[in-house]
Amino acid sequence: MAPHRRETELRRTRCSVSATSPDTRYLDATRRTLELFYRVLERQPGACVSLAMALEEHLVPPQVVILRGAPNEVESWQRRLDRVYRPATLTIGIHSRTNTLPAALDKPAPATGVQAWVCRGVSCLPPISEFANLESTLGNP
């Protein structure tokens, strides 16, 4: 039986975020999930698209962009980033009022504006506070 779509989307996000964390519990959980459903994925790949994407992201972790700031500004930056197709980049917008976060996402919220962290694996670049600099850092895919 194929896993429910919402569950696989959650697992896929967990896989992406776990790649930025030194805590291996999420990465281990991702590996176990992929092992559990691998035979289903092998027999019916069309029924497990999200799981196939999670497998790809497990093998080649995506670049993760973490945005922190005021809700309207974070959403504006996300919309602007979405204009360019970057399949190997996962953008996570976190409003400044959000307090309880996993360590991998717990970046300080700026007093004003938005700050972005570009991470690959457990390494993140210094915070970026200008959208043009973020675009330059991400480049064209």
Image (cartoon, grey):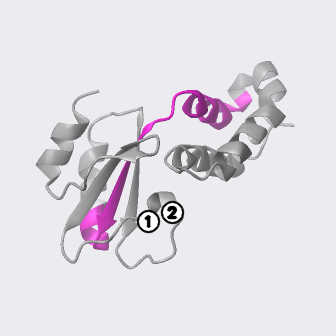
Front in this rendered view, residue 44 or 31: 31
Q: Is residue 62 magenta?
A: yes
Q: Residues within 10 Å of mark 1 (few under 14, many from 20)?
A: some
Quadrant in which the N terminus appears: top right
**Residue sitting at the far right:** 1
Residue 130 in picture, x, y percent from top left: 13, 55
Q: Hey, what amino acid is under mark 1?
A: Asp
Q: Residues within 10 Å of mark 2 (few under 14, many from 20)?
A: few
Q: Is residue 117 magenta?
A: no
Which residue in the structure is indicated by mark 1?
Answer: 106
Q: Is residue 45 above or below residue 15?
A: above
Helix, strand, or loop for circle 2?
helix
Front in this rendered view, residue 131 or 8: 131
Residue 35 in picture, x, y percent from top left: 79, 32
Q: Quadrant of residue 58?
A: top right
Q: Residue at x 49, y 47 (%)?
A: 20
Q: Hey, what amino acid is under mark 2?
A: Ala
Q: Residue at x 18, y 75 (%)?
A: 112
Q: Quadrant of residue 69?
A: bottom left
Residue 13 in picture, x, y percent from top left: 56, 48
Q: Which mark is residue 27?
A: none
Left or right: where 84 falls relative to 59: left
Q: Which mark is residue 103?
A: 2
Q: Residue at x 63, y 37 (%)?
A: 50
Front in this rendered view, residue 17 or 74: 17
Left or right: where 141 falls relative to 57: left
Helix, strand, or loop for circle 1?
loop
Left or right: where 40 falls relative to 130: right
In the image, the segment drawn in magenta is: 47-74
Quadrant in which the C terminus appears: top left
Residue 26 in picture, x, y percent from top left: 65, 50
